[in-house]
Amino acid sequence: MSALNPGFLQALKEALALYPTPFYAYDWTRVREGVERLKRAFPKARLFYALKANPRLGLLRRLRALGLGAEAVSLGEVLRAYRAGFLPEEVLWNGPVKTEEALKALQASPPLVVLDSEGDLLRVARLLPGAKVLLRVNPDLPVATHPHLATGRGESQFGVLPEEVPRLLALARERGLRVLGLHLHLGSKLEDPRDFLEGYRVLEGLFPEVGPVEVLDLGGGFGLGLDLKALREAMEALARLYGAEVFLEPGRYLVAQAGVLVARVVGWKRTRRNYLLLEAGMTTLLRPALYGAFHPVLPLYEGEGEEVYDLAGPACEAGDVLARGVALPPPKEGDALAFLEAGAYGASMALSYLDTPRPLELLWTGEGFEVLRRREPLEALWEGEA
Ligand SMILES: Cc1ncc(COP(=O)(O)O)c(C=O)c1O
């Protein structure tokens, strides 16, 4: 279990008396350490934080101040990055779907664009003439992660297969796009360095046909336990081969362990299993229901002995269980639990399903909490409806 910074843990307990639950809270000192670790591991790479992991403006401004760029996958995320102060050349726009509406909205200030298919290329060339682009390579590699997170397999919808790369680079140039280089993102939560090394080998194999480029974007996906040192040499050799600068797109690695979801116990229930009923469930933290993600649980109360519980949320779905088989001291009503490693894809995936307000988000700066986002007001749930 990843231990929380003692100061953060103490502040969390104090926050229970000050803020409405459930809430997400993030330890900024931990995020900053993650940035420093990545910079030390890859001193020559430029880092673009993947907003989707947690896109709060207060976090983005701080990351920009540390010299990071932003990686976005929707018009909303690109505009959010601009709103946080990132300049167009500091924002990378990824994803298989870039609609005409989105492309037109960005004509005045186009970000760097990652082309994902021939159709995408032609649309970008037509609506963002002269844009600076990368071409995303689908390396057709299996990787050791959940199938939903393995984006570099040949059957996934991302990127173009290696054999298509030379023709599409030529087409992009012919259509007036400014080709910066190639892009590779293998998937998320990758813990085995060999997955990355195989991906780099695919790009190495393309060099004779592609030739030198300005940029190799090698994506994100760094698992929390990944040995970064094992990648450095191969990454730098690849960059030297192409004469390129390396871009990386870390998301989860920077924020996952920095964040917790805090939720209170509402009640108990025995069926064939022993349940604790919580005020928050899958609408607030979707990852366990979506892809079986595991979040360690830390009680924020004192208690005697231990019982084993399943932790269920309020939704009327049997899948709304945040964790099963968790040994905890029996809580009282209103006692709080912290779900750890919830800083990435937690709040950003929170749903208003079942008219659940999206929760409060707090940032612990080392000195105190700042509100990153207030709890969504109930009225906002029906705003805009006739
Ligand atoms: C293109 C791209 N880059 C970066 C990321 C960030 O991945 P992670 O949070 O696993 O680092 C993702 C995640 O979906 C992605 O699709």
Image (cartoon, rainbow, N blue to C red):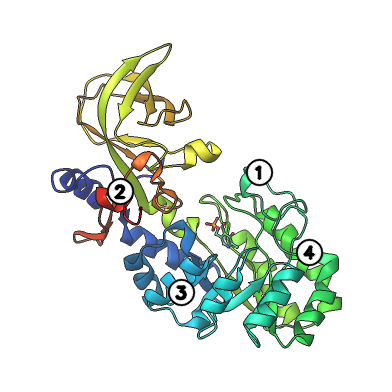
State the residue position of label 4: 202
Looking at the image, residue 154 lies above or below residue 287: below
Mark 2 sits on what residue? 359
* Residue type for callout 3: Leu
Dot 2 amino acid type = Pro
Disc 3 element: loop
Q: Distance of mark 4 from mark 3, alpha carbons?
A: 27 Å
Nearest to the eye among marks 3 and 2: give it: 2
- Mark 3 crowdedness (10 Å alpha carbons): few <14, some 14-19, many ≥20: many
* Percent x, y of residue 84: 37, 74
Contact between labelled residues 2 and 4, with CB atoms less than 8 Å apart: no
The answer to whether residue 361 is left or right of residue 166 is: left
Q: Tell me which numbered mark, 1 or 2, is placed earlier along the sequence.
A: 1
Closest to the camera, between mark 4 and mark 1, is 1
Q: Residues within 10 Å of mark 1 (few under 14, many from 20)?
A: some
Q: Is residue 30 left or right of residue 229?
A: left
Q: Nearer the viewer, residue 81 or 310?
A: 81
One can see residue 39 in this view: no
Quadrant of ligand 1: it is bottom right
* Tag 1: amino acid: Pro
Amino acid identity at mark 4: Val
Q: Residue 224: horizontal and vertical position, in percent?
A: 51, 51
Label 2 residue SS? loop
Q: Quadrant of the N terminus?
A: top left
- Give the labeled residue for mark 3: 68
Q: Which residue is mark 1?
A: 147
Q: What residue is shown at x 72% (from left), y 88% (from top)?
A: 176
State which mark lies toward you, 1 or 3.
Answer: 1
